[in-house]
Amino acid sequence: MTNLRLLAPLAAALALGLAACAGKEAEAPKDDVAEAAPVTEGAWTLDPAGSRLSYVSIKAGEIAEANRFEKLSGTVAADGTASLDIDLASVNTGVDIRNERMREIFFAVAENPKATITAKLDPAGFAGLAVGQSLTRPLKASVTIKGASADIDTEVLVTRVGADRVTVVPTAPVIISTDMFGLTDELGELRALAQLPSITPAVPVTFSLSFTRS
């Protein structure tokens, strides 16, 4: 009985000690999040493996087909200067002959290997973004294809998925048309080669871009 009376307070003290340790461990992730450097510090580089850019083309007025670009690269500097390069030769329509025509006729990749998107972000608008948080921001970007440029206005959802990783997606598809870049004749040539009654000149573009801190 004496031993039991001695062990009881010892067990209670041990239980309290373990509970205190468990509480400290549970709070550790919050401390890590709090110590994460603001997203405005340093430069960010696009992670190609975790990024996608695709569009939907419509032929004969009713047949929709998904297309994408396989190779992307880009950066966001600390001052908010952002750029994205699209390797036009990496276009993937799901059909080899169509890929070839897109590369040689539509984009003429031998002379115009890439499309470029540039934008100027306001770093102050992202300074308070914590790990696990998202925010939406308007975005005005300049798109250049085959030497022709056009401004695009959209809205993006930015999520900080880690201390050194953010993702960017549009809140709605971005509409791009051939008229914006002087590609109407090239589209007509593709339509004639494919013997189609029509190819819609406007396409919705979507993307999911993942950036890591350099």
Image: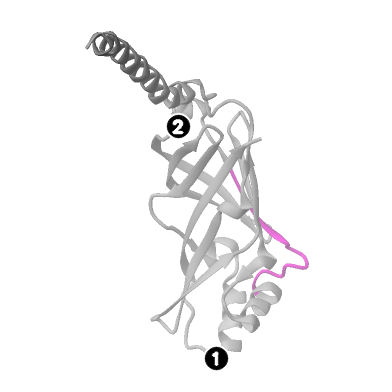
Determine the residue positioned at 48% across, 45% down: 168
Left or right for 26, reference 36: left
Secondary structure beneath label 1: loop
- Residue 9 x, y percent position in the rendering: 27, 9
| Residue identifier under label 2 | 131
In the image, is residue 17 above or below residue 86? above
Determine the residue positioned at 66% across, 79% down: 101
In the image, is residue 195 above or below residue 7? below
Residue 191 in magenta? no
Secondary structure beneath label 2: loop
Q: Residue furthest front?
A: 1
| Residue identifier under label 1 | 195
**Quadrant holding the C terminus:** top right
**Quadrant holding the N terminus:** top left
Determine the residue positioned at 64% across, 74% down: 102
Q: Residue furthest bottom?
A: 195
- Residue 154 x, y percent position in the rendering: 43, 48
Label 1 crowding class (10 Å Cα cut-off): few <14, some 14-19, many 20+?
few
Quarter of the figure with residue 49: bottom right
Foreground disc of the pair 1, 2: 2
Instruction: Say what amino acid the circle numbered 1 marks.
Output: Gln
Region in magenta? 106-118
Colour treatment of the image: one colour
Kindly indicate whether the residue at mark 2 contacts the one at mark 1 (C-beta within 8 angstroms). no
Residue 114 in magenta? yes
Sequence-first tag of 1 and 2:
2
Instruction: Say what amino acid the circle numbered 2 marks.
Output: Val
Determine the residue positioned at 62% across, 52% down: 48
Question: Count the marks: how many?
Answer: 2
Left or right for 202, reference 8: right
